[in-house]
């Protein structure tokens, strides 16, 4: 999608995918995982990282775990970190981890 992809669609889609990734139904989990993978391959990292972090921050423990796994296994964070993106530093969880690694 284009660089100027608007966030309102993502603000609805990403939390719904997060909930489905955390579902106890394996079929729903697998489908959500495929959709999330497709979404991450088409949407610019800086456009989606805020929604991923918000979903992780405000979701239940299953959602947090699922979203953390998505962030850890995708190239979203590495793309942002290598480009020194402001969106990267806006996610408090990763900002804390990056700052603690640099201070060691």
Image (tube, rainbow, N blue to C red):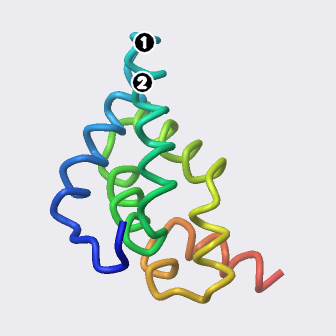
Residue for point 62% across, 86% down: 83
Label 1: few (<14), some (14–19) or many (≥20) C-alpha neighbours in 10 Å: few
Residue sitting nearer the eye, 10 or 71: 10
In the rendered image, the residue lying farthest to the right is 104
Q: Between marks 2 and 1, how big is the CA–CA gap?
A: 6 Å
Q: Relative to 27, does residue 54 appear above or below in the rendering? A: below
Q: Position of residue 12 (x, y in %)?
A: 18, 50
- Give the SS element for disc 1: helix
Identify residue for label 1. Answer: 27
Q: Which quadrant of the structure image shows residue 64?
A: top left
Q: Relative to 85, does residue 75 appear above or below in the rendering? A: above
Residue sitting nearer the eye, 5 or 61: 5
Residue for point 64% across, 78% down: 81
Residue for point 35% across, 73% down: 2
Q: Which quadrant of the structure image shows residue 24?
A: top left
Q: Position of residue 30 (x, y in %)?
A: 48, 21
Q: Position of residue 66 (x, y in %)?
A: 49, 36
- Label 2–label 1 contact, CB within 8 A: yes
Total tally of numbered discs in the picture = 2
Q: Which mark is residue 69?
A: none
Q: Is residue 52 left or right of residue 94?
A: left
Q: Relative to 92, does residue 62 appear above or below in the rendering? A: above
Label 2: few (<14), some (14–19) or many (≥20) C-alpha neighbours in 10 Å: some
- Give the SS element for disc 2: helix
Q: Position of residue 20 (x, y in %)?
A: 34, 28
Q: Quadrant of the N terminus?
A: bottom left
Identify residue for label 2. Answer: 31
Q: Relative to 69, does residue 75 appear above or below in the rendering? A: below
Q: Quadrant of the C terminus?
A: bottom right
């Amino acid at each position: 999608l284009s660089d100027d992809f608007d966030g309102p669609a993502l603000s609805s889609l990403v939390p719904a995918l997060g909930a489905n990734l955390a579902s106890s139904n394996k079929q729903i989990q697998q489908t959500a995982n495929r959709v999330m993978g497709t979404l991450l391959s088409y949407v610019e990292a800086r456009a989606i990282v805020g929604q991923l972090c918000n979903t992780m921050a405000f979701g239940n423990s299953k959602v947090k775990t699922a979203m953390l796994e998505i962030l850890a296994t995708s190239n979203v964070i590495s793309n942002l970190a290598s480009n020194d993106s402001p969106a990267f530093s806006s996610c408090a969880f990763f900002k804390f981890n990056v700052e603690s690694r640099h201070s060691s």
